[in-house]
Structure formats: C-alpha cells, structure tokens
Amino acid sequence: MIATRAPKSARKKVGASGEKPRHQITLAHLERSLENHRPSVSPEERWRLQMIYDAFQSDRTGEHKVPPGLSGVGERATLG
C-alpha cells in the first residue's frame, strides 16, 4: 500500500464498525495509470536539453558555451 485516504463522501461519516471507510492506492494503481501517460517533452527537446546538460557537466570553468546547432538557448520567448 502506498497511500490511504477516506473518500470525500465518507470523511464525516462513520461506518457500523466505528471506522471511516478508506481508499488504498497500491503500486498496481500507479502502474495502471502510467500506462496511459506520455512524456511531456518531445524526443527532440529531450535531446536538445541533454546536449545542454552534457556541455554544462563537461565544462566546469564557468564558461557555459552553447553546443552548436542549439538555437534559441538563453533567448526570451513569449507564449501566445
């Protein structure tokens, strides 16, 4: 069991045994929910970010150069 919480409908109610009913979240619940999810970052963006991170890790001199071909890094962007 990973987590438990009483359902909203039962939080103030007490059952015949005097206990509040509770939901249990198990690993199986989490695995089932992950089957329907996809990454929030595209493979191309993941690659681009990995290249930036690798460049950062390999050069600890304080000079963080942008790897070639990675335009748009450090520029402002607007959503709209």
Image: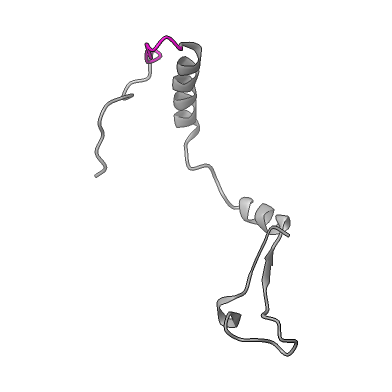
Q: Is residue 3 magenta?
A: no
Q: Is residue 13 above or below residue 52?
A: below
Q: Residue at x 30, y 25 (%)?
A: 74
Rendered image coloring scheme: one colour
Q: Residue at x 44, y 21 (%)?
A: 52
Residue 70 vs residue 7, the one in the foreground = 7
Image spot of residue 25 (x, y percent): 67, 62
Q: Residue at x 46, y 29 (%)?
A: 44
- The stretch in magenta equals 60-68
Residue 27 occupies quadrant: bottom right
Q: Is residue 62 magenta?
A: yes
Locate the C terminus by quadrant.
top left
Magenta stretch, main secondary structure, is loop
Image spot of residue 64 (x, y percent): 38, 14
Locate the N terminus by quadrant.
bottom right
Q: Is residue 10 above or below residue 61?
A: below
Residue 64 vs residue 38, the one in the foreground = 64
Q: Residue at x 37, y 11 (%)?
A: 63
Image spot of residue 53 (x, y percent): 47, 22
Q: Is residue 37 above or below residue 48?
A: below
Q: Is residue 11 above or below residue 70?
A: below
Image spot of residue 70 (x, y percent): 37, 19
Q: Is residue 15 left or right of residue 67?
A: right
Residue 32 vs residue 76, the one in the foreground = 76
Residue 67 occupies quadrant: top left
Q: Residue furthest bottom?
A: 16
